[in-house]
Amino acid sequence: MRVLLFGATGMVGQGVLRECLLDPDVQRVLAVGRGSIGKRDEKLRELVLPDVADLSDVEAQLSGFDACFFCLGVSSVGMSEERYTRLTYDLTLSVAQTLARLNPGMTFVYVSGTGTDSSERGRTMWARVKGRTENALLRLPFKAAYMFRPAAIVPMHGVRSKTGWYRALYALMTPFYPALKALFPNGITTTERVGRAMLAVARRGYSKPVLETPDINSL
């Protein structure tokens, strides 16, 4: 399997990258982003771009892939809906439309979030924008597309969030993961499980296109 990974420097992306590099079925990973990962592996190649939304000059390097794991995302805190839409909907669709044209046999996996609003009409701004993004992705001519909606994600194996208050929160949560998992089995997953679930749907598919935390954990 040849994998494109967007957002490998983020918390979810770090976990997904780890699972890809450990998986014997993954032959190659091309990580696309605005900065270098700072990691070396014989399977891994990097493509650093000033503007991830504009892939016109690197299209030749983006064909021949079996799966794309799209883990780019920003917090909506303090953002207008216009700016959040630009960084979420516009950027994601720009990338996905290019990849669908170059790789019609690709499986595209998008990291969304629990509470995403598929109706696109709810009161919560980020949920509307994420819902609009999901709906647009599901209409593209990929072999398959899956929307991952995890709730709380516990980082594992040295994975760290780039956001300071997230790091503090996860540092407090991690020792209690077994207890939290027992108390909230449908609300908590890990970076390891998210990465393995992405690889599972890329290999075998899944019975529905939108996966919540229980689906991710079962895979």
Image (cartoon, helix red, strand yellow):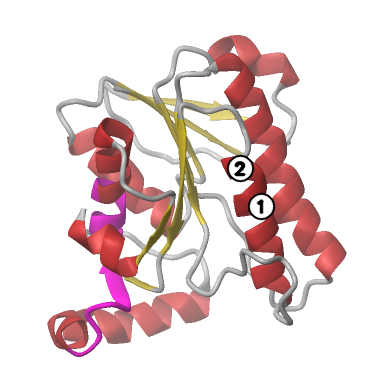
Return the residue nearer the eye: 213 or 27: 213
Res 160 → quadrant? bottom left
Residue underneath mark 1: 133
Q: Is residue 81 left or right of residue 10?
A: right
Placement of 187 over or under 132, stated as above or below: below
Expressed as whole percent of the image width and height from the top left, the position of residue 211 reads: 39, 58
Expressed as whole percent of the image width and height from the top left, the position of residue 213 reads: 33, 67
Res 122 → quadrant? bottom right
Q: Count of labels shown?
A: 2
Mark 2 is surrounded, within 10 Å at the Cα level, by few (under 14), some (14 to 19) or many (20 or more) other residues, namely many
Expressed as whole percent of the image width and height from the top left, the position of residue 17 reads: 33, 42
Q: Is residue 109 left or right of residue 18?
A: right
Whether residue 191 is in magenta: the answer is yes
- Disc 1 to disc 2, how far (Cα)? 6 Å
Q: Tell me if label 1 and label 2 are in contact, CB under 8 Å.
A: yes
Residue underneath mark 2: 137
Q: Amino acid at mark 2?
A: Leu
Placement of 4 over or under 178, stated as above or below: above
Q: Amino acid at mark 1?
A: Thr
> Residue at 54% of width from left, 26% of height from top?
47
Q: Is residue 201 left or right of residue 63?
A: left
Which type of secondary structure does the marked residue at label 1 adopt?
Answer: helix
Note whether residue 154 is visible: no
Res 177 → quadrant? bottom left
> Residue at 52% of width from left, 70% of height from top?
163
Magenta span of residues:
183-196
Q: Is residue 121 left or right of residue 62?
A: right
Expressed as whole percent of the image width and height from the top left, the position of residue 215 reads: 29, 61
